[in-house]
Image (cartoon, rainbow, N blue to C red):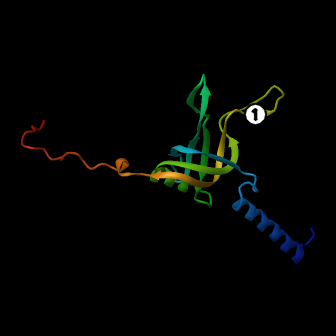
Amino acid sequence: MATATKADLEARISELETQLAASSGDPKAAGMVRLVGMLKAVKDISRPDGGKLTVSAILTNSTRDNRGGKEVNVDLPIDSIIATDNGVPIASEILSIANNTEWARVAISGYWTVYGEITRNDRGYPVAYRRQLRAQRIEVLNSAPVGPEFAQPEAPFSAEPTGEEVPF
């Protein structure tokens, strides 16, 4: 087995630093997909045994289209998202955004992963008909913070019985 020289090790360190900078810098340079949409249906799907925080969510989009001379809103297919706190608190960040905003338009960068059953096509190759974006980064493009109308309401009545109420 050949021993590495100091120059070889320094070159390898430089190469790894370049890869790390690309993965944490520009998502496009790291080969990530970037999806933009309204963040909805955020759910904590962590394992009950106390594992890493994992959340699932969807991104929704709609567009306007002209049908028969009339403008109509058309909902587009949703994109499924999954995120896990694995060194970077991406799942915690998504959960925080969902809990602290009435609505949020976000850009999520990540990598596609298989979601659901894997089958074989006519030529025998494995194929998945559903996919999910493994989130690596999130950016809030615009949002509305939770307002007073969404805050926990105070009790509208007293829990103490009045003189007019008869206990069972």
Q: In the rendered view, tell whether residue 143 sits above or below residue 131.
A: below
User: Badge 1, how many Cα within 10 Å: few under 14, some, many 20+?
Assistant: few
Residue 119: quadrant of the picture = top right
Q: Which residue sits at x=51%, y=45%?
A: 43
Q: In the rendered view, tell whether residue 99 sits above or below residue 4.
A: above
Q: Position of residue 162 (x, y in %)?
A: 10, 44
Name the secondary structure under disc 1.
strand
Task: Report the amino acid beneath label 1.
Answer: Val
Q: Which residue sits at x=15%, y=47%?
A: 160
Report the front residue among 78 and 91.
78
Q: Position of residue 5 (x, y in %)?
A: 90, 76
Q: Position of residue 94 (x, y in %)?
A: 54, 52
Residue 118: quadrant of the picture = top right
Residue, disc 1: 127
* Quarter that holds the N terminus: bottom right
Q: Which residue sits at x=68%, y=33%?
A: 117
In the image, farthest residue toward the bottom: 6
